[in-house]
Amino acid sequence: MKDIFFCPEESNFYSNCLESFALRNCKKSECIVEFGSGDGSPVINSLLRNKFDGMIQGFELNTSAWKAANSTIDEYNLAHKYIIHNSSFFESSQSSQTKAEYLVANPPYIPAPDNDIYMPLLFGGIDGATVTNELLSLDYENVVLLISSFSNPKSTIDHANANGYCVSSFLILPLQFGYYSSEPKVKQHIEELRKQQMAFYSGNYYFLAGVLFKKCQEVKVDLSNELIQAMTSL
Ligand SMILES: C[S@@+](CC[C@H](N)C(=O)[O-])C[C@H]1O[C@@H](n2cnc3c(N)ncnc32)[C@H](O)[C@@H]1O
């Protein structure tokens, strides 16, 4: 199990964000695609708590995580609502003909000089925001993402705005540095990013935001500035 992403606090928060921002609003039947399903628990827990008639298509590169997710999906008889592909999201999802209404992810956001870290699939590029920003370049109508305050959050919000997205809603969770972000090589790198105003934290705490990005024409009040303020306030 050691090679499967494990952080229940973070996964539960992601599950709550999925429920509030995507599951309850979905209208079409094939409406949600997920980048990086992990052991599947966030979506599975949301499905068990909500009436949802659509289908969620997940993508997970890590084969152990994919196997664990499938066995839980079978245990709860959810195979008609949640299908996970053991392939890279970037290679697979773009070839699908119909675009989902929602793209959802708790993406890899660990900043480091290179991907030689405890779990290489959690590498988020030098500033931690590379994968997140890529997910905001794919033109989905709605994107639900977790964003970390030590992963250059301002660049992500600027990138979203430049791609026509506004912030429709967000939730914030203070989290303690965990197993992956406390790895000495990663922690030192985050300290460097802080000097360049690309990482924000206080003592052992950072903020994780669950954000609903929507195309700006669909948003009445854009909360981008409020989100930047909250994420850089540590
Ligand atoms: C932070 S974990 C989140 C896991 C799960 N969604 C959760 O919140 O508990 C990110 C996941 O993305 C997966 N991943 C990384 N790159 C990927 C890619 N290109 N395509 C699909 N999954 C990927 C990792 O293996 C990892 O399981």
Image (cartoon, grey):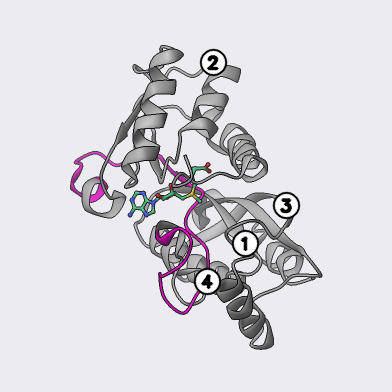
Marks 1/3: CA distance? 10 Å
User: For mark 2, what is the residue?
Assistant: 51
Sequence-first disc among 2 and 3: 2
Q: Are marks 2 and 3 in contact (CB under 8 Å)?
A: no
Inspect the image, locate mark 2, and give the three-letter code of the amino acid beneath it. Lys
Foreground of the two, 95 or 69: 69
Q: Which residues are magenta?
A: 93-120
User: For mark 4, what is the residue?
Assistant: 111
Marks 4/2: CA distance? 37 Å
Q: Nearer the viewer, mark 1 or mark 3?
A: 1
Whether 117 is among the magenta residues is yes
**149, above or below 178, in the image:** below
Foreground of the two, 228 or 148: 148
Residue at x 35% of width, y 18% of height: 79
Foreground of the two, 221 or 151: 151
Sequence-first disc among 4 and 2: 2
Marks 2/3: CA distance? 25 Å
Residue found at the far front of this picture:
2
Q: Are marks 3 and 4 in contact (CB under 8 Å)?
A: no
Sequence-first disc among 1 and 3: 1
Marks 3/4: CA distance? 20 Å
- Asked whether mark 1 lies closer than 8 Å to ligand 1, one says no
Tag 3: Cα neighbours inside 10 Å, few (<14), some, or many (≥20)?
A: some
Horizontal and vertical percent position of residue 66: 35, 36
Look at the image and tell me whether residue 50 can be seen.
no
Marks 1/2: CA distance? 30 Å
**Tag 3 secondary structure:** strand
Inspect the image, locate mark 1, and give the three-letter code of the amino acid beneath it. Ser
Sequence-first disc among 1 and 4: 4
